């Protein structure tokens, strides 16, 4: 069997050899007829010698051997090229016109929209922080990169080896006059007015480095050096763009500098961006996350090398903590500052060239990516200033397959990359500090949770209610007509600014234009508030701004702030989170956040403002713990109510910090803002303000009272107690009486309801429930009114019925001649 297979293989090889031979020698088919002619001559005319057939056999053998040699050489060259690509440090230059042609085909409809959207977000964020001196305010109105893509590898592309990693280097050339980037600027003094700035051409030239990492699961990219950047800029006012560029001197150079600085900070070596190449795309948009960072240790710190690049920075020394072990003043004493966006944290001071901290910090991400920076400082005894020694950074990014990539710059410009397939997986990285032989840092990173725009969470501990929303968020509703309930539960490890170690912290919450405040907790760095606040939800990704203060004698001092992303809140699910405070070295706030849906019939009316013939009933009940405005330690408070252009006041309560007014005010419901100003009455001097607040009533259901204690703003303490109701006459609750039933049935319904109400009223009187008695009396009066309306309706129907009977009788009388004649007989 094997012999037969071998013969078949030889036959096939001979056929391929013959085909190759015919391709190389097209005249060969003419040789075969010639051989037949010679054979015929030998057969019938005269005999030829046998050397002719031998010569033909020898020639065929030589041709077959030549074909075999060429086949072996080609196969060897292919294998040699593969070995060269895998082992050679540098490959030959190759041009990639095919890539540029492919990019040109997919640029307009696929690549350009995606890149324009991404770059517009980056440009808009950069413009908020960096503005020209001639521009007071600037906003991005349009952004399009046009129809001409950049060109890659015009001067060749080649691969190189850096350590054990492969790096591709190619040229990058983008020269286009087809872009449309429109900026609207409000000019500062002395120019004033507004102007439109149009970027209509871009020129960027440089060299790119592309490095596959994580076995091809991702790729980093960066420029070798700062690229050459030129922008074409046009200026105009109103709708015209025809004004010359000299209208705004210096703006063109400012835009070029802004573009160059942005590239330097994001894309120029050693700073690199990462492109994830996931096998699966779950189509989720990450909007934030929770990251635990454990700083383990540093090693190979050299005092001589570090001090050679040290610079002095001032940090408050009152917040330092030290180890219990005695520290030798001659040893290097260092600590780390961890920075993520505006959030900073610090470790303790440790001594030696290999300090160990093993300290964990809870950090918050406000996007799908972030840069974690570690700054190393040296502490010198007796000096309030610290020397900045060096730093390093680790970048992270959400991958669409629900995983996370961490990467950093390693030794000799290599890349250190880690991949966490699931949230909660620990990743340990050892990253060198920037500089030559300045040591390295070991940290442990745990991405606890990703938060998505559709309300779902990617975490290791997901409750049953939130698991249901991971598949698509069926509970997620459009962000209109909902309330956000935020409970400020407690604080932990808040900064103590007072020299005697006391702190009276309180929290301010700002959502949109509405601001709320908790009470102050005296003398506690770990306060407990448990205060609940409600806000009307705002669309467009509005952040909740949280600011923490401590009360001082003259002015309150900030002890941290934070931003909370409220996108993707699910109804019926409470988000319990610890929010680390930014711009301070310690402190967390615990918040419980919940979204509540307003009923459709309520939200459709309440969200549109006013009702016809409706009014606002405001009951000012009392206030407590007001600020003392008089020298004797009391106040004479009254409330000034502003509703649109209307102003009303309560009576004055003299010499008290806990006044009780119990006064009712009414206003037409036109949707105007309602503001309460608590003032101190003075006979001769002007009145002084002791707090104010805004009353949110627009989303209240009609004819339902809201009872609120509202903290006063602009003062250290004080609350006011109010009751507010949106009165709507046509929606007032009526007893459930069916007038279409028989009169006997209606009479029994009203009678039974009045009996039940009287029984309820007696029980409330026995229980001394004054509020319940008031409500029952109101309902009883409503039943009485209903009874009177029913009696009036019965009388009206009786009168109409009698009139109808009389008319019918008259018609019958007129239509009957017998009755007519009988009636006329004398």
Image: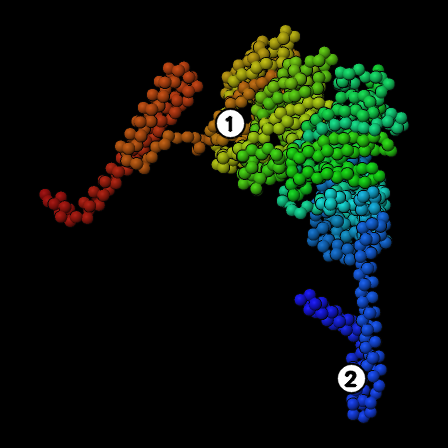
Q: Residue furthest bottom?
A: 45
Between residue 550 and residue 249, name the one nearer to us.
550
The residue singled out by tag 1 in the image is 616
Q: In the drawing, does residue 385 fall left or right of residue 281?
A: right
Q: Earlier in the sequence, mark 1 or mark 2?
A: 2
Position of residue 463 relative to residue 815, above or below, is above
Q: Quadrant of residue 43?
A: bottom right
> Element at badge 2?
helix
The x and y percentages for residue 90 are 85, 50
The x and y percentages for residue 360 are 70, 26
Is label 1 or label 2 in front? 2
- In the image, what residue occupies the spot 43% across and 30% down? 732
Residue 154 visible in the current orientation: no
What is the C-alpha distance between the residues marked 1 and 2? 114 Å
Q: Residue furthest top?
A: 632
Marks 1,2: beta carbons within 8 A: no
The residue singled out by tag 2 in the image is 33
The x and y percentages for residue 253 are 84, 41
Position of residue 616 relative to residue 421, above or below, is above
> Element at badge 1?
strand
Q: In the rendered image, which quarter contains the N terminus?
A: bottom right
């Amino acid at each position: 069997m094997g012999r037969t297979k071998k013969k078949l293989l030889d036959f096939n090889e001979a056929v391929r050899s013959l085909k190759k031979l015919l391709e190389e020698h097209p005249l060969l088919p003419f040789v075969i007829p010639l051989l037949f002619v010679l054979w015929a001559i030998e057969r019938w005319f005269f005999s030829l010698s046998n050397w002719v057939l031998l010569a033909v056999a020898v020639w065929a053998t030589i041709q077959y051997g030549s074909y075999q040699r060429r086949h072996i050489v080609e196969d060897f060259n292919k294998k040699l090229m593969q070995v060269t690509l895998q082992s050679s440090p540098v490959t030959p230059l190759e041009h990639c016109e095919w890539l540029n042609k492919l990019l040109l085909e997919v640029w307009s409809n696929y690549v350009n929209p995606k890149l324009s959207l991404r770059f517009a977000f980056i440009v808009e964020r950069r413009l908020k922080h960096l503005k020209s001196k001639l521009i007071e305010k600037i906003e991005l109105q349009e952004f399009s990169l046009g129809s001409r893509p950049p060109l890659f590898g015009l001067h060749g592309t080649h691969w190189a080896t850096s350590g054990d990693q492969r790096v591709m280097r190619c040229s990058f050339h983008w020269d286009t006059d087809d872009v449309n980037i429109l900026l609207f600027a409000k000019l500062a003094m002395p120019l004033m007015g507004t102007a439109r700035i149009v970027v209509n051409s871009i020129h960027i030239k440089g060299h790119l480095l592309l490095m596959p990492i994580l076995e091809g699961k991702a790729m980093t990219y960066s420029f070798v050096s700062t690229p050459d950047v030129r922008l074409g800029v046009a200026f105009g006012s109103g709708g015209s763009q025809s004004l010359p560029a000299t209208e705004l001197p210096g703006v063109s150079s400012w835009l070029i500098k802004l573009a160059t600085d942005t590239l330097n900070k994001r894309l120029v070596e050693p700073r690199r961006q990462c492109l994830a190449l996931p096998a699966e795309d779950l189509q989720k948009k990450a909007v934030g996350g929770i990251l635990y960072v454990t700083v383990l240790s540093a090693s190979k710190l050299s005092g001589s090398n570090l001090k050679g690049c040290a610079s002095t920075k001032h940090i408050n020394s009152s917040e330092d903590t030290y180890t219990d072990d005695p520290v030798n003043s001659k040893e290097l004493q260092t600590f780390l500052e961890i920075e993520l966006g505006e959030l900073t944290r610090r470790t303790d001071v440790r001594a030696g060239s290999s300090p160990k901290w093993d300290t964990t910090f809870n950090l918050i991400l406000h996007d799908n990516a972030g840069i974690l920076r570690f700054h190393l400082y040296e502490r010198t005894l007796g000096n309030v200033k610290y020397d900045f020694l060096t730093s390093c950074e680790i970048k992270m990014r959400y991958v669409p397959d629900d995983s996370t990539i961490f990467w950093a710059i390693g030794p000799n410009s290599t890349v250190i990359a880690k991949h966490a397939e699931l949230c909660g997986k620990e990743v340990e990285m050892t990253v060198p500090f920037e500089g030559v032989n300045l040591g390295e840092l070991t940290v442990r990173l745990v991405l606890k949770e990703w938060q998505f725009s559709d309300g779902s969470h990617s975490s290791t501990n997901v409750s049953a209610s939130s698991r249901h929303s991971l598949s698509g968020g069926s509970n997620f509703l459009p962000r209109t007509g909902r309330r956000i309930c935020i409970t400020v539960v407690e604080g932990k490890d808040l900064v103590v600014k007072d020299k005697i170690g006391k702190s009276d912290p309180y929290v301010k919450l700002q959502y949109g234009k509405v601001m709320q405040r908790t009470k102050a907790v005296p003398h506690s760095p770990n306060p407990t508030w448990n205060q609940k606040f409600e806000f009307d939800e705002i669309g467009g990704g509005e952040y909740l701004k949280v600011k923490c203060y401590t009360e001082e004698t003259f002015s309150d001092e900030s002890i941290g702030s934070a931003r909370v992303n409220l996108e993707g809140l699910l109804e019926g699910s409470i988000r319990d989170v610890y929010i680390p405070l930014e711009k301070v070295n310690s402190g967390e706030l615990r918040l419980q956040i919940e979204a509540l849906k307003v009923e459709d019939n309520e939200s459709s009316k309440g969200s549109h403002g006013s009702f016809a013939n409706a009014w606002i009933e405001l009951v000012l009940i009392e206030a407590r713990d007001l600020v003392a405005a008089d020298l004797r330690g009391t106040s004479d408070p009254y409330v000034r109510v502003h509703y649109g252009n209307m102003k009303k006041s309560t009576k004055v309560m003299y010499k008290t910090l806990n006044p009780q007014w119990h006064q009712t005010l009414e206003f037409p419901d036109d949707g105007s803002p309602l503001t309460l100003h608590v003032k101190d009455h003075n006979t001769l001097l002007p009145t002084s303000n002791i707090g104010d607040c805004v009353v949110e009533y627009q989303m209240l259901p009609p004819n339902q009272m809201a009872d609120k204690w509202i903290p006063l703003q602009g003062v250290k303490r004080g609350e006011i107690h109010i009751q507010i109701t949106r009165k709507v006459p046509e929606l007032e609750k009526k007893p459930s009486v069916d007038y279409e039933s028989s009169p006997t049935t209606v009479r029994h319904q009203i009678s039974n309801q009045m009996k039940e109400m009287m029984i309820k009223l007696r029980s409330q009187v026995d229980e001394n429930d004054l509020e319940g008695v008031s409500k029952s009396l109101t309902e009883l009066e409503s039943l009485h009114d209903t009874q009177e309306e029913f009696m009036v309706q019965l009388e009206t129907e009786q009168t109409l019925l009698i009139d109808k009977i009389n008319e019918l009788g008259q018609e019958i009388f007129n239509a009957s001649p017998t009755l007519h004649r009988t009636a006329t007989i004398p």
